[in-house]
Amino acid sequence: MNLAGVALWGFIATVVLTTLMAGAQGLGLSRMSIPFILGTMFTANRDRAMLVGVLVHLAVGWMFAMLYAAGFESLGRATWRLGAAGGLLHGTFVLVIGMSALPGLHPRMASERHGPTPTRALQPPGFMALHYGRWTPLIALASHIVYGALLGGLYQPGGP
C-alpha cells in the first residue's frame, strides 16, 4: 500500500469533503455539521467541540482512505470512477445506517424515541439526516462521492 499517497490524498479528500459540507451549512442548505456532532461526543464545550470535531473527522477520513486504498490495491487499480462508486456506497451507508445509529452512540444527542433532556439536547439526525434539512442527504452523498473520486483519481496503488 502506498502509505504516503493515502496519507496525502486521504487528508486532501477529507478536507474537501468537510469544506463542501460546511459550505452547504453556511449557505443554509443544511443544518448538519459533522465536526460539531463529532466534537460534542467528546466535550460539552460547544466552542471547543468544533476544533475537536475537525480533528476527529480528519482522523476518521484518513481511516476511511486506508479502506479505499485497500480496495484499490486489491483491484490493482484506482480510478476516479471506482472511487466515486466507493463514495456512493460510503455516503449511502453513513446516511442510512450511521445517522440512525448516531443517537445511540452520542452522549449528548436526543433520540427519535426519547426527546431532549438537559444532557441530551442535540437534535437527532433522523432517517438520512433529514432533520437537518431536505438538501442534507444530497449534499452528504455528493460530498462523499467527491471524496471517493478524489481518492480514486489521485491515489497510485503499489507503493512502499
Image: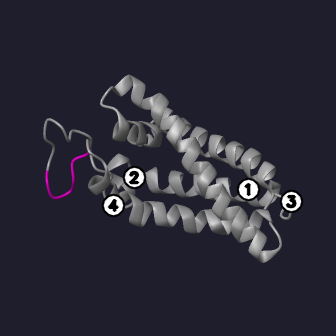
| Residue annotated with mark 2 | 134
Disc 3/disc 2 C-alpha distance (Å): 42 Å
Looking at marks 3 and 1 on the same chain, the residue that comes earlier in the sequence is marked by: 1
Q: Is residue 153 above or below residue 42?
A: below
What is the crowding at mark 3: few (fewer than 14 residues within 10 Å), some, or many (at least 20)?
few
Q: Nearer the viewer, mark 3 or mark 4?
A: 3
Q: Earlier in the sequence, mark 4 or mark 1?
A: 4
- Label 3 vs label 4: CA separation? 36 Å
Secondary element at tag 2? loop
Who is closer to the viewer here, 84 or 157? 157
Sequence-earlier tag: 2 or 1: 2
Q: Which residue is mark 4?
A: 101
Looking at the image, do the residues carrying marks 3 and 2 touch, with CB atoms under 8 Å apart? no
User: Are the residues flagged by discs 2 and 1 in contact, CB closer than 8 Å?
Assistant: no
- Label 1 sits on residue: 151
Of 116 and 58, the residue lying toward us = 58
Q: Which residues are magenta?
A: 109-114
Q: Nearer the viewer, mark 4 or mark 2?
A: 4
Other residues around mark 2 within 10 Å, as few (<14) / some (14–19) / many (≥20): some
The image quarter in which residue 8 lies: top right
Q: Which residue is mark 3?
A: 159
On screen, residue 104 versus residue 51, left or right, reads left
Mark 4 crowdedness (10 Å alpha carbons): few <14, some 14-19, many ≥20: some
* Whether residue 129 is visible: yes
- Identified by mark 2, the residue type is Arg
Dominant secondary structure of the residues highlighted in magenta in the image: loop
Kindly indicate the quadrant of the structure image that contains residue 97.
bottom left
